[in-house]
């Protein structure tokens, strides 16, 4: 079977947070210009070359290569990429060269379009992983904290190659638009209705605006956690959420025996007035794993919520002490912690709620260092 060589040229803009005056991937008195100074990788039958050209430094001015040597900070605003894939089937090569983007693929083209998409994912996986590793080095090792990685969004195959201005060639022939995928898929999630302000709550909102008190610390931490998670900062989101749980448990522990609601459940035998010291003794993990299930029965604090909180605390420990990088199920963790915090708040005395702005007791935090 006759096969062909596919080559694809791309241009990846370096995305940044707008935190400093001239955000970019920054070099010092030089730039590794040209393919000879590029980074070569072979992975998953894809040959990749990442390299810089002089024009990547052009922004407000257009320095020459000699002028760059006098610059303290040399700003690169994009990276060039060159992809080579060997042994592309003739039918696929012909389809890629002649793909008509003015219409959707016909029924007879569905199988070959699927092959095109499969090749696109193969290329994109290598491209983003290696590009992100370049950004990760500058971000973490060199401290260029303003740099952003590309997220691997399974629904955006088409727009990735479009934004990268991908151009392909078969066996070094004529240039064609390399753009697998058929449009993009967008997922929209709507918050639950309890996040919206109802008519009955307006008086409370008005009182808050006129007053000077702060919002409860637990609520601030949970909202911050959800914001971090929505922006892809899962480890930071997990830390914020578990901190909210610590604050809620600390307030719960300060609920002395004056809190008749809690005392009616556990009774005088447990000594509710000593609950804070017991929490301090058991630490966060022990409190979530053993004490809360004993204090609050299933009909008040369901096992599913407890399980989510317990796993969130364990995952936070792995992140902090074992260097875990990838946090999964972050939405489930946050939802479980939010539910648990609400339940604990319902069983807090007024005096403990008044101190809700305080950070968690040091003893509660102590098991984070164990």
Image (cartoon, grey):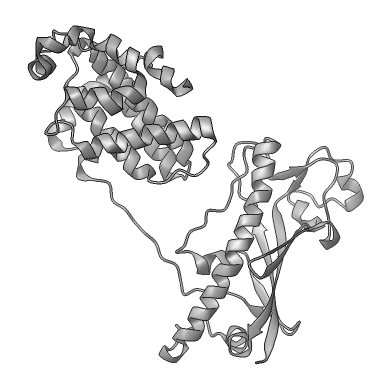
Identify whether 100 is placed above or below 312: below
Image quarter of residue 285:
top left
Q: How many marks?
A: 0
Q: Which of 346 and 284 is in front in this view?
A: 284
The answer to whether residue 217 of the structure is visible from this angle is: no
Task: Decide if residue 27 is on the left or right side of residue 265.
Answer: right
Q: Position of residue 83 (x, y in %)?
A: 69, 69
> Hey, which residue is sitting farthest left in the picture?
264
Residue at 83% across, 60% down = 34
Identify the residue at the far right of this view.
Answer: 66
Asked if residue 310 is positioned above or below residue 61 in the image, the reply reads: above
Would you identify the image quadrant in which residue 309 lies? top left
Give the left or right position of residue 187, taking residue 200 as reference. Answer: right
Q: Position of residue 212 (x, y in %)?
A: 30, 16
Q: Which residue is drawn at 48% across and 64% down?
A: 156
Q: Which quadrant would residue 300 be assigned to in this image?
A: top left
Residue 209: x and y in percent read 27, 23
Q: Horizontal and vertical percent for residue 306?
A: 25, 34
Q: Which of 317 and 3 is in front in this view?
A: 317
Q: In this view, does 254 lie above or below 233?
A: above
- In the image, taking residue 4 as reference, residue 129 lies left or right, namely left
Q: In this view, does 5 lie above or below 256?
A: below
Instruction: Point out the image quarter for the N terminus.
Output: bottom right
**Residue 188 makes an appearance in the image:** yes
């Amino acid at each position: 079977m006759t096969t062909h060589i596919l080559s694809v040229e791309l241009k990846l803009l370096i995305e940044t947070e707008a935190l400093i005056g001239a955000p970019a991937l920054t070099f010092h008195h030089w730039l590794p210009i040209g393919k000879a100074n590029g980074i070569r990788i072979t992975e998953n039958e894809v040959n990749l070359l990442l390299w810089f050209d002089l024009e990547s430094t052009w922004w407000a001015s257009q320095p020459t290569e000699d002028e760059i040597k006098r610059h303290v900070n040399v700003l690169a605003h994009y990276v060039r990429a060159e992809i080579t894939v060997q042994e592309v089937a003739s039918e696929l090569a012909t389809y890629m060269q002649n793909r008509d983007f003015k219409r959707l693929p016909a029924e007879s083209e569905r199988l070959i379009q699927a092959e095109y998409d499969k090749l696109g994912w193969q290329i994109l996986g290598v491209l983003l992983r290696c590009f992100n590793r370049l950004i990760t080095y500058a971000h973490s090792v060199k401290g260029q904290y303003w740099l952003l990685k590309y997220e691997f969004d399974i629904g955006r195959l088409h727009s990735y190659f479009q934004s990268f201005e991908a151009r392909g060639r078969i066996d070094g022939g004529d240039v064609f638009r390399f753009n697998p995928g058929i449009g993009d898929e967008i997922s929209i999630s709507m918050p639950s209705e309890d996040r919206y302000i109802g008519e009955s709550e307006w008086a409370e909102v008005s009182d808050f605006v006129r007053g000077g008190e702060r919002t409860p610390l637990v609520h601030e931490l949970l909202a911050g956690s959800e914001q971090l998670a929505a922006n892809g900062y899962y480890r930071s989101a997990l830390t914020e959420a578990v901190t909210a749980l610590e604050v809620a448990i600390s307030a719960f522990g300060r609920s002395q025996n004056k809190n008749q609601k809690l005392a009616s459940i556990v009774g005088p035998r447990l000594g509710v007035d000593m609950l804070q010291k017991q929490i301090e003794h058991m630490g966060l993990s022990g409190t979530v794993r053993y004490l809360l299930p004993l204090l609050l029965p299933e009909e008040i604090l369901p096992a599913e919520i407890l399980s989510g909180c317990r796993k969130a605390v364990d995952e936070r420990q792995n992140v902090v002490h074992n260097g875990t990088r990838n946090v999964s199920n972050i939405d489930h963790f946050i939802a479980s912690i939010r539910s648990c915090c609400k339940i604990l708040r319902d069983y807090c005395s007024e005096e403990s709620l008044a101190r809700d702005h305080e950070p968690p007791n040091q003893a509660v935090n102590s098991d984070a260092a164990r």
